């Protein structure tokens, strides 16, 4: 059976077997969005796990700046070709923790969260591989967030003197 998508080309799937790749590919679909499209907001139900085939996406959050001030948008990460986003699709409570907006016209391989979780339940070894790969994504995102936080803290400390 030919793969619908070349998933093995993406680092997320580097430790998956050929059979696991075939199962994942069968449940994948392609989605395309134009630059400026907001894919989801923080708090939305996580409907998809995404791999970027082409384009660029900003993951961001709005930070309250105090009464009578508009919230400030903070970019947490920029996701590009080959990278994964939307890990909340497989991690309870299945709600996105950041917002996502396409910076370029972007093409994704999307995995429906309900189908993906069903597949993970039916094939525990596959589910374990997905969760290992998701843990790497979360770890990378946390590292990027820490870098931003340290940078922001450093700037605020410097401006106090």
Image: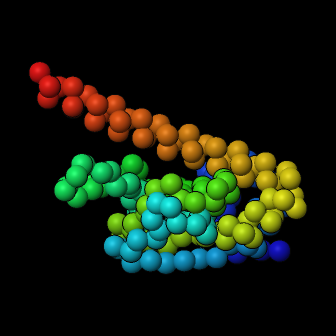
Q: Residue at x 50, y 61 (%)?
A: 43
- Give the quarter of the image for residue 19: bottom right
| Relative horizontal placement of residue 7, taking residue 16 as reference (left or right) | left
Q: Which residue is at the far left?
A: 161
Task: Tell which of 37 and 46 is nearer to you.
Answer: 46
**In the picture shown, does residue 67 fall above or below 108?**
above
Q: Residue 129: image x %, image y %?
A: 76, 49
Q: Residue at x 56, y 39 (%)?
A: 139
**In the picture shown, does residue 121 fall above or below 146?**
below
| Relative horizontal placement of residue 76, taking residue 87 as reference (left or right) | left
Q: Which residue is at the far top?
A: 161
Quarter occupied by the C terminus: top left
Quarter occupied by the N terminus: bottom right
Q: Residue at x 43, y 40 (%)?
A: 144
Tag count: 0
| Relative horizontal placement of residue 136, taking residue 157 as reference (left or right) | right
Q: Residue 38: image x %, image y %?
A: 40, 71
- Give the quarter of the image for residue 123: bottom right
Is residue 14 visible in this depiction of the protein? no
Is residue 43 visible in this depiction of the protein? yes
Q: Which residue is at the far front?
A: 67
Q: Residue at x 28, y 36 (%)?
A: 152
| Relative horizontal placement of residue 15, taking residue 36 as reference (left or right) | right
Q: Residue 51: image x %, image y %?
A: 57, 62
Q: Residue 98: image x %, image y %?
A: 46, 56
Task: Tell which of 4 and 105 is nearer to you.
Answer: 105
């Amino acid at each position: 059976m030919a793969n619908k998508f070349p998933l093995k080309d993406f680092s997320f799937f580097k430790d998956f077997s050929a059979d696991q790749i075939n199962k994942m590919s069968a449940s994948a679909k392609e989605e395309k969005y134009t630059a400026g499209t907001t894919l989801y907001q923080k708090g939305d139900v996580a409907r998809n796990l995404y791999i970027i085939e082409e384009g660029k996406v900003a993951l961001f959050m709005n930070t309250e700046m105090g009464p009578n001030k508009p919230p400030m948008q903070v970019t947490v990460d920029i996701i590009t070709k080959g990278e994964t986003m939307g890990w909340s699709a497989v991690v309870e409570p299945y709600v996105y923790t950041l917002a996502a907006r396409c910076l370029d016209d972007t093409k994704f391989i999307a995995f429906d969260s309900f189908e993906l979780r069903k597949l993970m339940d039916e094939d525990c070894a596959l589910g374990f591989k997905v969760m290992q790969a998701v843990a790497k994504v979360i770890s990378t995102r946390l590292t990027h967030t820490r870098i931003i936080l340290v940078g922001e803290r450093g700037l605020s400390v410097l401006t106090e003197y």
